């Protein structure tokens, strides 16, 4: 395989991940804050469980197809036996830890996106790059140049600027498609139609809770990603990425089912049903999460985990532009400065991106 083809494949995967991440953040936020009918809002625990179940089924189908191509003369039972042997033997049990952490991380992200606006969530969640770097040093014994450490420092600084209190900037907007005469509480929306569909009352969103959730999710994301990368790239135990996805999804089902569905939301589900609040937009977010899981796995195979996370910084710009243009949101000055610092940190790191 030529180097040009490998580079094209690498950047295609990263581009899909950026678009997927931006679309998921916008749609997921919309499903968590918009007004709902009398049936109530969909439960995050059921969505998390469905995502892992769908990923498990799709990965199993792809693995079976891959095994059939490798052993075309084997009967179906033999093919299934080979798949089950690959999944449940070897070091697959090691994915129990990242599976549990991944389920926790997803739950925290639901909490964060429900209490922060899209742009602030996107920028703050990039702290996972810093945690990924720290866990890479601890678990993978990876070393970083001064430029990369500087990029990580600037990343942290930029996120801190974004989180600076906006009391003096509340009425100011650098990027807004509303007229200055409309500044005030209604600045977040552009017209009555948007207000009816988005309707984000300030009393509903708890910014400190959202910030705490996204910080905790950043830590679990760094640990989960690095641990998964260590298992996937273990040279002594080569296993297909689809097998790894089966293992990760299979072990993720247990905390999602017993802790999320039965323990946390068992009473709500028994009262209102498993699919309460589900609509086309909710199913779209589930599909995007499934797509993101597969794309992230491919990124880990072809790139290191930090490169994947830095590429996701591009989704900040995409989400910001869509949020401003489509939903009429305003952008305070400190957010623009902080985001500019984060983007500069992205430049410092990406110019030394190894061509793998």
Image: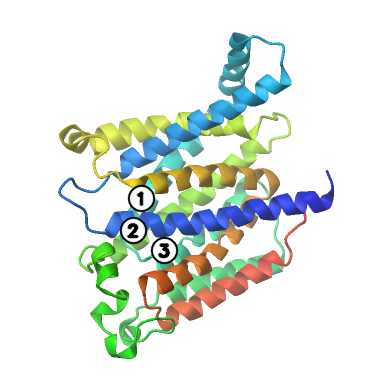
Q: Which element is circle 3 on?
A: helix
Q: Nearer the viewer, residue 67 or 215?
A: 67
Decide if residue 128 is in sight here.
yes
Of pointers 2 and 1, the one earlier in the residue sequence: 2
- Kindly identify which residue carries mark 1: 281
In the image, 26 versus 231, the foreground residue is: 26
Q: Mark 2 or mark 3: name the one nearer the start of the chain.
A: 2
**Residue 159, how many percent across, how many down?**
48, 70
Pinpoint residue 310: horizontal percent, then vertical percent: 60, 61
Q: Earlier in the sequence, mark 3 or mark 1?
A: 3
Residue 71 screen position, x and y as percent: 72, 17
Q: Nearer the viewer, residue 137 or 94?
A: 94
The residues tagged by marks 3 and 1 sit, at their Cα atoms, a distance apart of 20 Å
Q: Is residue 53 left or right of residue 87?
A: left
In the rendering, at what x and y percent does residue 65 appear?
Answer: 63, 25
Residue hosting label 2: 30
Judging by the rendered image, the residue that carries numbered circle 3 is: 121
Give yes or no for contact between labels 2 and 1 (Cβ–Cβ under 8 Å): yes
Residue plotted at (30% across, 66% down): 207
Q: Quadrant of residue 43?
A: top left
Residue 279 drawn above or below residue 210: above
Nearest to the eye among marks 3 and 1: give it. Answer: 1
Q: Is residue 278 above or below residue 57?
A: below
- Tell me the crowding category of disc 1: few under 14, some 14 to 19, or many 20 or more residues within 10 angstroms, Cα based: few
Cα distance, mark 2 to mark 3? Answer: 13 Å
Q: Secondary structure at mark 2?
A: helix
Residue found farthest to the front: 193
Judged left or right of residue 71, residue 65 is left
For numbered disc 1, what is the local secondary structure?
A: helix
Task: Determine the residue positioned at 68% across, 11% down.
Answer: 74
Give the residue displayed 59% in from the left and 53% down from the top. Answer: 16
Q: Using the numbered discs, state the Cα–Cα distance from disc 2 to disc 1 in whole angstroms.
A: 9 Å
């Amino acid at each position: 395989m030529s180097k040009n083809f490998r580079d094209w494949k690498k950047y295609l995967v990263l581009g899909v991940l950026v678009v997927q991440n931006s679309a998921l953040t916008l749609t997921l936020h919309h499903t968590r804050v918009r007004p709902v009918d009398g049936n109530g809002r969909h439960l995050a625990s059921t969505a998390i469980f469905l995502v892992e179940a769908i990923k498990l089924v799709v990965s199993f189908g792809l693995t079976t197809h891959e095994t059939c191509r490798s052993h075309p003369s084997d009967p179906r039972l033999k093919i299934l036996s080979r798949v089950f042997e690959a999944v449940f033997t070897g070091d697959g049990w090691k994915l129990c830890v990242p599976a549990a952490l991944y389920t926790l991380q997803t739950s925290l992200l639901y909490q964060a996106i429900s209490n922060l606006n899209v742009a602030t969530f996107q920028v703050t969640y990039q702290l996972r790059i810093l945690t990924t770097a720290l866990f890479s040093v601890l678990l993978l014994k990876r070393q970083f140049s001064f430029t990369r450490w500087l990029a990580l420092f600037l990343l942290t600084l930029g996120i801190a600027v974004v989180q600076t209190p906006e009391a003096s900037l509340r009425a100011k907007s650098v990027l807004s498609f509303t007229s200055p005469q409309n500044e005030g509480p209604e600045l977040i929306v552009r017209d009555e139609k948007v207000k009816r569909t988005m309707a984000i009352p300030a009393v509903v969103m708890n910014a400190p809770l959202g910030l705490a959730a996204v910080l905790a999710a950043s830590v679990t994301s760094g640990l989960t990603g690095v641990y998964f990368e260590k298992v996937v790239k273990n040279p002594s135990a080569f296993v297909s990425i689809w097998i790894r996805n089966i293992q990760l999804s299979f072990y993720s089902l247990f905390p999602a089912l017993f802790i999320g569905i039965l323990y946390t939301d068992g009473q709500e589900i028994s009262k209102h049903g498993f699919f309460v609040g589900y609509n086309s937009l909710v199913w779209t977010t589930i599909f995007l999460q499934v797509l993101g899981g597969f794309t992230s796995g491919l990124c880990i195979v072809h790139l290191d985990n930090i490169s994947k996370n830095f590429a996701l910084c591009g989704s900040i710009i995409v989400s910001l532009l869509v949020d401003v243009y489509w939903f009429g949101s305003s952008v305070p000055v400190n957010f623009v400065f902080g985001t500019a610092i984060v983007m500069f940190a992205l430049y410092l790191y990406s110019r030394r991106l190894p061509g793998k």
